[in-house]
Image: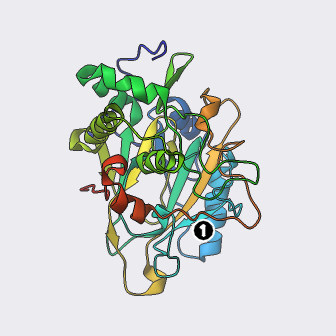
Amino acid sequence: MGAYQHASGSFAWRADASIARIDVNSDLKAAYEEVRSGKGVVIIRGLPVDGTLEAFCAAVWEAGRHFGAALSQNAQGELIGHVIDATADDPTPRMYRSNLELRPHNDITAMIALACWQKARSGGASVLVSGVTVHDEMRRRAPELLVPLYRGYHYHRLGEEGPNEEPTTPYRVPVFSAVKDQLSCRYQRAGIAAGHRSRGVPLTDEDIAAFNLFDEIAKAPENRLAFYLERGEMMVVNNYTVMHARSQFENHPEPERQRRLVRLWLDAPGFRDVPREFNLFESNGVPPQSGRRASYDFRKLYADDPVASGGVPSIDA
């Protein structure tokens, strides 16, 4: 399982942890260091919400530049993503483009920034979980179940693979990895279940037990922070140490008041040493692929394979 000997520290925190809140006009170098080597998350306040959405996106972009360069978030090459409920227009949307609950997971980026333009009518709480805390609790309760997580799994590429790439990762992506005694995490249970289902490589009882314990610890109230981003607030998260999630939400009836978060995926040289296998593609993020788009139907996966996928997510926030 590597040489990781961590027992406690900055990245291992529970529900009583405090998040640094920093004004957008202050020196954001300290905010970057808090994300890189502190608790792994900051909230930036004071982004403009009295003007247009375009002006807000520009302010989010400018704040994001203090943390790193923007990565492509999908095969269309989008650098600025919009987290909305698009189910009325898109029959197979990415899960973040629905109003469904999202269980704790990591995206395929170094950092993720989420800025609030509009809140939901109800629900839509942001949930954060320390991957280090989950690891250390698993080591305390069932260390043998960390073995398959360090070995890793095949991920589905959701239809965004390039012309010379397989639909799934031919290599295994570790859930936990220790490089230079730094523990990092990459976990997305449904992506793993989809990958192994597509490759015809069944997940074992040990794998399922490891996922179930991981999820049990991650969703425990004492291990997660749940809060609402207010308008004009942006959280920046170390995606290698902190998992994020969301509770289900209900929108306002007026289209202009529907919940909308603006999303950046960011990376910076020297941010963190992680295994090459953490990338699901040739580079971090999702490289642009002309004519391609994410097409995988996760709702069908949850219905067809509830054991491997964990079933429909449920997070009480």
Tell me what residue is drawn at x 54 percent, y 35 percent: 173
In the displayed structure image, the side of residue 69 where residue 5 appears, left or right:
left
The one nearer the camera, 96 or 37, is 96
Tell me what residue is drawn at x 51 percent, y 47 percent: 195
**In the rendering, at what x and y percent does residue 116 appear?**
48, 64
Work out which residue is located at the far bottom of the displayed protein and give it.
Answer: 254
Tell me what residue is drawn at x 65 percent, y 48 percent: 285
Q: Quickly name the residue at label 1.
A: 56
In the displayed structure image, the side of residue 32 where residue 286 appears, left or right:
right
**In the rendering, at what x and y percent does residue 70 appear?**
68, 51
User: Dot 1, crowdedness within 10 Å: few (<14), some or many (≥20)?
Assistant: many
Res 179 quadrant in image: top right
- Quarter of the image with the C terminus in it: bottom left
**In the rendering, at what x and y percent does residue 166 appear?**
66, 48
In this rendering, the answer to whether 304 lies above or below 179 is below
In the displayed structure image, the side of residue 129 where residue 274 appears, left or right:
right
In this rendering, the answer to whether 56 lies above or below 44 is below
Count of residue discs:
1
- Quarter of the image with the N terminus in it: top left
Whether residue 300 is visible: yes
The one nearer the camera, 197 or 265, is 197
In this rendering, the answer to whether 150 lies above or below 87 is above
Question: Looking at the image, what colour scheme do you see?
Answer: rainbow
Q: Amino acid at mark 1?
A: Phe
